[in-house]
Image (tube, helix red, strand yellow):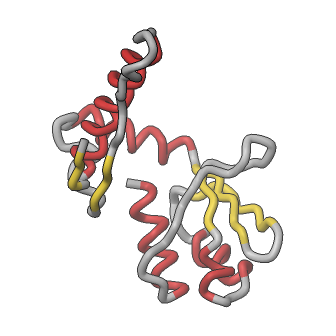
Amino acid sequence: MYEIEIKTKTEEITGLKDIKLSSPPPSMKGDISTNAAMVAGISPEKLAEGLKELDIVKEIDIVGPGFLNITLTDQAFIDELKEIVSDPSKYGKGMKSGKVIFEMVSSNPTGPLHIGHGRGGAIGDSLSRIYERMGYDVSR
């Protein structure tokens, strides 16, 4: 939920349609990072001011030429957990779109099989299922 709120407000301020959110590096403060101000060519202060209007935003650090590191309130995480618990079957379903190809396990005909082959298959299949749940068209 909080990602949708941040993306919607950022789109409203910047005019961008495809807002990219990521995690800031571990050495920096914040829960979410975006370079939307730099991409849109607006001042990061303007975007920060607009995002501070959201109840879920605790503070915003402006880093470099246009990156914003956003720290969320505890209530934002509590609300997210309440949403997950209220209906786990719907959480995260169909939020994305696109095509993804997973290439996982390939046994080498000239060498022995090892534990990594099994691990790669299990991880690849798990990721494939997660991407399918989010709405991607997955090929394995």
> In x, y percent, where is residue 43?
72, 86
Residue 129 lies in what quarter of the image?
Answer: top left
> In x, y percent, where is residue 65?
80, 76
Of residues 121 and 55, the one nearer the viewer is 121
Q: Which residue is found at the position 42% from the left and 73% from the top?
A: 8
Query: With respect to residue 3, does 91 lie above or below?
Result: above
Quarter of the rendering occupied by the C terminus: top left
Of residues 139 and 74, the one nearer the viewer is 139
> In x, y percent, where is residue 80?
39, 43
Of residues 8 and 35, the one nearer the viewer is 35
Query: With respect to residue 51, does 39 lie above or below?
Result: below
> Quick one: which residue is furthest to the front in this view?
110
Query: With respect to residue 36, does 119 lie above or below?
Result: above
Q: Is 64 on the left-hand or right-hand side of 55? A: right
Residue 97 lies in what quarter of the image?
Answer: bottom left
Q: Which residue is found at the position 48% from the left and 47% from the top?
A: 76
Of residues 61 and 124, the one nearer the viewer is 124
Circle count: 0
Q: Which residue is found at the position 62% from the left and 82% from the top?
A: 39
Quarter of the rendering occupied by the N terminus: bottom left
> In x, y percent, where is residue 59?
69, 58
Q: Is 68 on the left-hand or right-hand side of 132? A: right
